[in-house]
Image: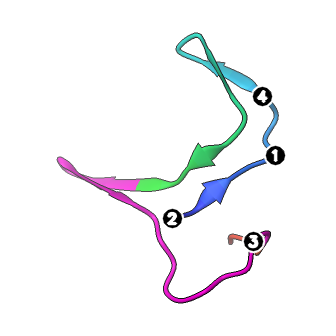
Amino acid sequence: MVLVANLKPAKLRGIESQGMILAAQEGEALALVTVEGEVPPGAVVK
């Protein structure tokens, strides 16, 4: 799973968010964005 952290805090639906989990949607299908193999914490997402 890809987690985006250290974001500027924002209120979403009344709850403070400081990060996001990336997901993709096509039609009704929703899937978490993942990586293949090991990636060290802090690796750059492009």
Mark 3–mark 2 Cα distance, whole angstroms, equals 12 Å
For the residues carrying marks 3 and 1, which lies nearer the camera in this image?
3
Identify the residue position indicated by label 4 in the image.
9
| Numbered disc 3: secondary structure | loop
> Which residues are the magenta region?
24-42
Q: Position of residue 1 (x, y in %)?
A: 51, 64
Q: Earlier in the sequence, mark 3 or mark 4?
A: 4
Identify the residue position indicated by label 1 in the image.
6
Mark 3–mark 1 Cα distance, whole angstroms, equals 13 Å
Q: Estimate how packed mark 1 is, as few (under 14), some (14 to 19) or many (20 or more) residues with alpha carbons within 10 Å.
A: few
Q: Earlier in the sequence, mark 3 or mark 1?
A: 1
Q: Earlier in the sequence, mark 4 or mark 2?
A: 2
Mark 4–mark 2 Cα distance, whole angstroms, equals 21 Å
Determine the residue positioned at 66% across, 82% down.
39
Determine the residue positioned at 79% across, 69% down.
42
Identify the residue position indicated by label 3 in the image.
41
Question: Which mark is drawn over residue 1?
Answer: 2
What amino acid is at disc 3? Pro
Q: Position of residue 36 (x, y in %)?
A: 49, 86
What amino acid is at disc 2? Met
